Image (cartoon, grey):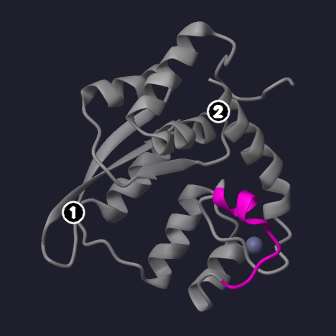
Amino acid sequence: MQRAGNLDFDSQEIKQYIRALKEIDFEPAYLALLTCEGLKPLSRWEKPLDNYGLGLLHQTGLLTKQIQRTVKTGKVVIETIFSTSFGYIQLYEKRFAGTPIDKSAQTQRFEGFLFGFPPCCVDEYIRHPYAKNDLSPEEQKILFHWACTNCKITPLLLPAYKSTYDLLNSF
Ligand SMILES: [Zn+2]
């Protein structure tokens, strides 16, 4: 299949970088591919990455930033964000750098916008988290948002997520 992303996934070099990311953890590798393909404007891995890990993300064409946040106890946590667009990195940094992690409706809406979540799903999740949807567990698990009941957008996203997920598993 012809892929529209910026990356040449047939390149052995690119495959090596993605494999190395996968060795760190499956999640940042999957998020990186989804972001490279433009399915997510920005991704957040809720952990720090060392220079080696950040370098791997840069090799796939992503811009990165480590963001310092705090949790309720006052403990500092480091998040890694990445995007192909400097604008999205800046939006995230300006809004969240140095702030306590919160789950307010306002935050969830802005995060949904940055992470490429359908607004209908974000809205329903705010009102009724994990409401019953039409997805199979296998479909739901490859997404980063909880699909809303009778979602009209998620079924259009699923094939693209699935092909990225399968591609990553083939590396
Ligand atoms: Zn929805």
Q: Earlier in the sequence, mark 1 or mark 2?
A: 1
Mark number displayed over residue 169: 2
Outermost front residue: 137
Query: Can the viewer see residue 60 in this picture?
Result: no
Q: Is residue 87 left or right of residue 55?
A: right
Pick the residue in front: 136 or 116. 136
Q: Quadrant of residue 95?
A: bottom left
Looking at the figure, which quarter contains the N terminus? top right
Residue 88 image position (x, y, % from top left):
48, 49
Whole-angstrom CA distance, mark 1 to mark 2, is: 35 Å
Q: Identify the residue shown where x is 63% and y is 75%.
A: 122
The residue carrying mark 1 is 98
In the displayed structure, 131 sits above or below 77; it is below
Residue 80 image position (x, y, % from top left):
35, 46
Secondary element at image label 2: helix
Looking at the figure, which quarter contains the C terminus? top right
**Residue flagged by tag 2: what amino acid is it?**
Asn
Q: Is residue 90 left or right of residue 14?
A: left
Q: Quadrant of residue 165?
A: top right
Secondary element at image label 1: loop
- Determine crowd level at label 1: few under 14, some 14-19, many 20+ residues with C-alpha closer than 10 A: some
Q: Identify the residue shown where x is 43% and y is 83%.
A: 104
Q: Was residue 90 drawn as part of the magenta stretch in this picture?
A: no
Residue 31 image position (x, y, % from top left):
54, 43
- What span is in magenta? 131-141
In the displayed structure, 92 sits above or below 39; it is below
Q: Where on the image, by quarter, is ligand 1?
A: bottom right
Residue 153 image position (x, y, % from top left):
81, 64
Q: Is residue 91 left or right of residue 151?
A: left
Query: Can the viewer see residue 21 in this picture?
Result: yes
**Residue flagged by tag 1: what amino acid is it?**
Gly
Pick the residue in front: 108 or 136. 136
